[in-house]
Image: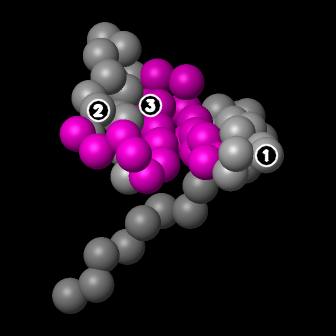
Amino acid sequence: MQIVCKCKYCGHSTISDNENDMTLEFDALEEEIRFVCRNKNCRKNNVISFASRKKTQPLPKAMVGR
């Protein structure tokens, strides 16, 4: 699995070493999570966007258990 994290403030991307399995990108700059399908018949980019949701309905507050 290759994991990509992009900084919301400067746009710098940090990429994990193993790119042979799949790619998962956490993009704080665009407020999206992207997953690239590795199926040879698909290869589509799946996007979950939080930017539009934040304007209409904020995400619930996270609670940490004791």
Q: CA distance from mark 3 to mark 1?
A: 29 Å
Residue 9 image label: none
Highlighted range, magenta: 17-38
Q: Residue furthest top?
A: 10
21 lies above or below 47: below
Q: Are marks 3 and 1 in contact (CB under 8 Å)?
A: no
15 lies above or below 58: above
Q: Quadrant of residue 52?
A: top right
> Is 53 a magenta residue?
no
Q: Amino acid at mark 1?
A: Asn
Q: Residue furthest front?
A: 40
Q: Which residue is mark 3?
A: 28
Q: What residue is at 65 percent from the left and 33 percent from the top?
A: 51
Instruction: Find numbered disc 2 in the image and state the secondary structure of the residue it sits on.
Output: strand
Instruction: Find numbered disc 3 in the image and state the secondary structure of the residue it sits on.
Output: loop
Within 10 Å of the Cα at label 1, are there few (<14), some (14-19), or many (20+) other Cα atoms? few
Q: Which residue is mark 2?
A: 15
